[in-house]
């Protein structure tokens, strides 16, 4: 398969450009190898790395060794913890590597401020059901985050979650505030069609169809929920857009 451009062609969605990130935890037992191939073949634009440092959800995320191995790619680390836990990774700020901190986890607000002061590209991850409180907090603030990740479903996201009306409202609000916005959870053709202004969609089980999808399968499933012609290099794949 030929390499594609890193985002939608400019003709799609009246000029909207949309990047595709893949949730690495949804790639199955060989997720590091699969994620590396997806990036190298440019089937996706970036990797989404969930990091739960301890606590009840630690088994849901990636191991620290996996994050270190994949952090050289264009990636977003989704931090569900404090600055102290993040420092265990031993990473340094660089272009193409972002950290989004989960709203309201213990130490989250402090971690975001410390990461920003240390030179990191920092954003927030927010449950769609709580977006109004976040919006009110940031209105008029000069140091509000540049990037917002909207979780359409629960914390942490449940596999196969549906795109919610709260997520649509949250995305529209934050886009209206001039922020870069990504959608994590419930990504589908319906979601892509119904929102304008998104920067990134994070694909998981809704698109991948379960854990363990091989890179060629991922390519086919990504192509199927995108508009025809959005990715010329997917010409050998069958799009079901609009069916």
Image: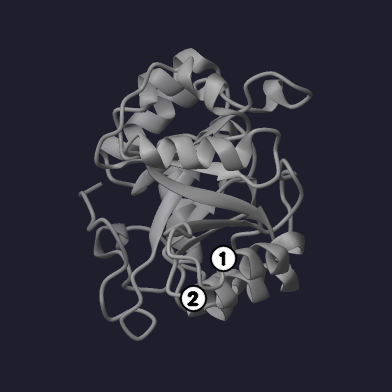
Q: Which of the image's four quarters has the C terminus?
A: bottom right
Q: Is residue 188 above or below residue 220?
A: below
Residue nearest the viewer, comparing 117 with 220? 117
The 10 Å Cα crowd at callout 1, few under 14, some 14 to 19, many 20 or more, is few
Residue 49 point in image, percent of width and height = 50, 34
Q: Residues at badges 2 and 1 in contact (C-beta under 8 Å)?
A: yes
Residue nearest the viewer, comparing 207 with 19? 19
Q: How far apart are labels 2 and 1 at the CA level?
A: 9 Å
Residue nearest the viewer, comparing 75 with 105? 105
Residue 54 point in image, percent of width and height = 69, 18
The 10 Å Cα crowd at callout 2, few under 14, some 14 to 19, many 20 or more, is some
Q: Is residue 242 visible?
A: no
Residue 234 point in image, percent of width and height = 31, 59
Q: Residue 7 got which mark?
A: none
Residue 109 point in image, percent of width and height = 60, 43
Residue annotated with mark 2? 177
Q: Which residue sits at x=50%, y=21%?
A: 30
Q: Is residue 101 above or below residue 148?
A: above
Which quadrant holds residue 107?
top right
SS for dot 1: helix
Residue annotated with mark 1? 138
Q: Earlier in the sequence, mark 2 or mark 1?
A: 1
């Amino acid at each position: 398969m030929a390499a594609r451009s890193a985002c939608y062609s400019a003709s799609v969605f009246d000029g909207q450009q949309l990047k595709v990130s893949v949730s690495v935890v949804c790639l199955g037992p060989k997720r590091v190898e699969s994620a590396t191939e997806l990036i190298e073949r440019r089937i996706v634009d970036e990797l989404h790395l969930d990091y739960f440092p301890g606590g009840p959800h630690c088994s849901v995320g990636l191991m620290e060794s996996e994050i270190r191995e994949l952090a050289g790619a264009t990636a977003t680390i989704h931090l569900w913890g404090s600055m102290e836990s993040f420092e265990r990774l031993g990473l340094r700020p660089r272009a193409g590597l972002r950290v989004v901190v989960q709203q309201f986890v213990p130490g989250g607000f402090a971690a975001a401020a410390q990461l920003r002061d240390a030179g990191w590209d920092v954003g927030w991850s927010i449950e769609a059901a709580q977006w109004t409180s976040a919006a009110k907090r940031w209105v008029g603030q000069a140091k509000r985050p540049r990037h917002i990740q909207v979780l359409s479903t629960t914390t942490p996201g449940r596999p196969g979650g549906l795109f919610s009306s709260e997520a649509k409202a949250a995305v529209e609000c934050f886009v209206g505030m001039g922020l870069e916005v990504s959608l994590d959870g419930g990504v589908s053709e319906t979601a892509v069609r119904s929102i304008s202004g998104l920067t990134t969609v994070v694909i998981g089980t809704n698109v991948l169809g379960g854990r363990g999808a091989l890179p060629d399968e991922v390519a086919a499933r990504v192509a199927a929920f995108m508009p025809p012609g959005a990715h010329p290099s997917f010409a050998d794949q069958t799009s079901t857009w609009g069916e």
